[in-house]
Image: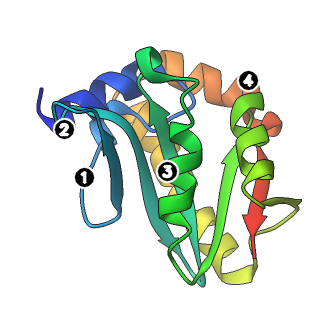
Amino acid sequence: MEDREWLKSMFRKELDLRPPTLARIGENSIFIRDDSGQPIAHATLSRRGGGIEINSVVVDPQHRGQGLSKELLRLAGQSKRRLFAYTKDPRMKSTLLQAGYSPARSPGFRPSLNLMVTRPAIFLWMILTLDVKRVVHITRHMFAYKLYIRR
């Protein structure tokens, strides 16, 4: 299966992630592959002002519990910039804390400005593409997402 198709299929299954129509692969993508070269885990890094957001962390359900999220964080951590991630998933919270991230209230002024533009744009895209299940899910859980930063 092509990387982008695999990623889109994972996005379809996880309502906390970006809409599948926004699945992009580029220089800010991190993949972990199995022995046959098939993707089994992925993370996207997005520049946000003076920091980098780790978003769209996904592990194939058949490969969960093998430490792949920790490996994705380790690979993302090679960046010298401040890293941050939002999550409501208890497993991801635990992984972030184990990797040295701390709960925080804000990623900083410049990253917050960036997020004030990008988040509503993604939400509007979900509305325009009639991704109703995702819109309802994100709206219902909006205040459950917490910020974690590695300084």
Q: In which quarter of the image is residue 127?
A: top left
Q: Mark 1 or 2 closer to N-term?
A: 2
Residue that mark 3 sits on: 72
Provide residue 75's location: percent of width, then percent of height: 47, 61
* Residue type beneath disc 3: Leu
Q: Residues within 10 Å of mark 3 (few under 14, many from 20)?
A: many
> How far apart are the two marked residues, 3 and 2, measured between alpha carbons?
16 Å
Residue sitting at x 69%, y 49% = 86
Determine whether 54 is above or below 14 in the image. below
Q: Which of 117 and 79 is in front in this view?
A: 79
Q: What element carries label 3?
A: helix
* Residue type beneath disc 2: Asp
Determine whether 113 is above or below 119 in the image. below
Provide residue 61's location: percent of width, then percent of height: 46, 17
Q: Mark 1 or 3 closer to N-term?
A: 1
Q: Mark 2 or 4 closer to N-term?
A: 2
* Residue type beneath disc 4: Arg
